[in-house]
Amino acid sequence: MEWDDIPRAFKESYACLAHEAPTECDHGAHWLLADRDGTGPRTDRNRAVPPELGEDQSGKWLVMVSPEEVDAVWAEVAGATRAGELGPSSKAGTEWQRQAMRASTHLICAYCEDWRDIEDLRRVLTALRRLGLSTGIASFKRDKDTIAGEYQDAGRLPNPSVWVAYAGGVEEPVRLYTKWLSTRWPFAKTELDGTNDAEVARKIEELWG
Ligand SMILES: [Zn+2]
């Protein structure tokens, strides 16, 4: 089963406050959380971002990781999040969640405060790449689209992720595109070139909210 096929209600649910390793968590919790301020999760509700940040603006880079690698990868991502090298928070799907969904991989989300802050999104993706992650094609999804139930092939959007990054390494500039300026199939790509970032985001808000 693919992540996008999972009903939304199942993905929400609760975070584990007891475990640090996703594969050790087998007791009905969906997520492990890490916060930038180092205090750890402040609640066991699966919140996308810390409560003071609005989910109408936030979003996340999506990272799929195999069960064999997820504990080591999550230790790196959680550590980088607590050290302030990523965004305000990150989360990892637990082993319990993976088995319950019959999924082959764990999902790690690296949250960013504002989907329109392209410079910050590039910074966070580069930090993920420094950890050896997200060097292939990477997707950034807005929380408001997750909340609205926008998953692959199920929604109104040209692509459930507002931004997609081309494959690239740490030394290369992050290259992003969107299909959201195109409203009819086949959805054309618009590349962000660093000078049109704000303009593209503004047009997307006009088109899709
Ligand atoms: Zn647990």
Image (spheres, helix red, strand yellow):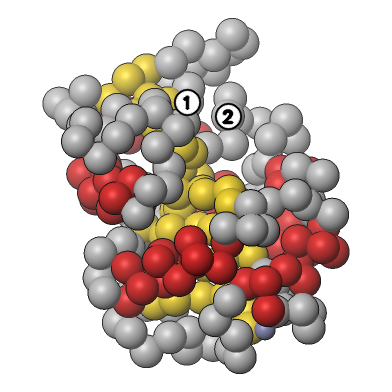
Residue tagged 2: 159
- Image coordinates of residue 190 in percent, x first then y, are 37, 17
Q: Is mark 2 within 8 Å of ligand 1?
A: no
Which label's residue is closer to the chain start, 1 or 2?
A: 2
Placement of the N terminus among the 4 image quadrants: top right
Callout 1–callout 2 Cβ contact below 8 Å: yes
* Above or below for 11 versus 29: above
For the residue marked with disc 1, what is the amino acid? Trp
Tell me the residue at 30%/35% (across/down): 169
> Dot 2: what SS?
loop
- Ligand 1 falls in quadrant: bottom right
- Image coordinates of residue 153 in percent, x first then y, are 73, 30
Residue 122 relative to residue 63: left or right:
left
The label on residue 180 is 1
* Above or below for 147 versus 145: below
Crowd around label 1: few <14 · some 14–19 · many ≥20 (10 Å): many
- Image coordinates of residue 128 in percent, x first then y, are 35, 51
Name the one closer to the observer, 37 or 157.
Answer: 37
Residue 155 relative to residue 207: left or right:
right
Tell me the residue at 44%/76% (across/down): 34
Question: Which image quadrant is residue 184 in?
Answer: top right
Tell me the residue at 35%/54% (across/down): 131
- Image coordinates of residue 79 in percent, x first then y, are 36, 73
The answer to whether residue 67 is seen in the rendering is: yes
